[in-house]
Image (tube, rainbow, N blue to C red):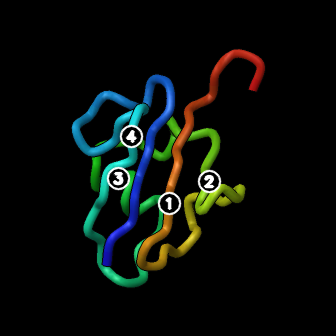
Amino acid sequence: MKVNIKCLSSLSGSEECVFNNSKALEIEAGQTVGDIAGSIGISPEDIHLVFVNSRHADLQTRLEDGDAVTLAPAVGGM
């Protein structure tokens, strides 16, 4: 299955997770947001906000085919 992932602010920069476009990522059934974050080299401690399909979620949210995931770090005022 595939999900689309987008990273904001300091989490962006790796080839798998950029700010200006979402990237398709092949994942296994039953994987969580935390699983895919780890697989692209982002530590769960660096993630402050998670959105799946534009709805607030968390690192334990199980993903489904076609989900859109956005990850954001803590920034001033958050």
- Residue on which disc 2 sits: 51
Q: Earlier in the sequence, mark 2 or mark 1?
A: 2
Label 1: element kind: strand
Q: Quadrant of residue 66?
A: bottom left
Q: How many marks?
A: 4
**From the image, which quarter does the N terminus lie in?**
bottom left
* Residue 68: numbered disc: 1
Q: CA distance from mark 2 to mark 1?
A: 8 Å
Amino acid tagged 4: Asn
Q: Quadrant of residue 54?
A: bottom right
Q: Earlier in the sequence, mark 1 or mark 3?
A: 3
**Image point (41%, 74%), residue name:** 31
Is 59 drawn above or below residue 6 in the view shown?
A: below
- Residue on which disc 4 sits: 21
**From the image, which quarter does the C terminus lie in?**
top right
Q: CA distance from mark 3 to mark 4?
A: 20 Å
Q: CA distance from mark 1 to mark 4?
A: 11 Å
Callout 1 touching callout 4 (CB < 8 Å): no
Q: Nearer the viewer, residue 55 or 10?
A: 55
Image coordinates for residue 75, horizontal then vertical, percent = 64, 21
* Residue 47: numbered disc: none
Is 58 situated left or right of 28 in this image? right
- Residue on which disc 3 sits: 38
Is 37 drawn above or below residue 8 in the view shown?
A: below
| Number of the front mark, 2 or 1 | 1
| Number of the front mark, 2 or 4 | 4
Callout 2 touching callout 1 (CB < 8 Å): yes
Q: CA distance from mark 2 to mark 4?
A: 15 Å
Q: Earlier in the sequence, mark 1 or mark 4?
A: 4
Image coordinates for residue 47, horizontal then vertical, percent = 54, 40
Circle 4 packing at 10 Å, graded few (<14), some (14-19), many (20+), is few
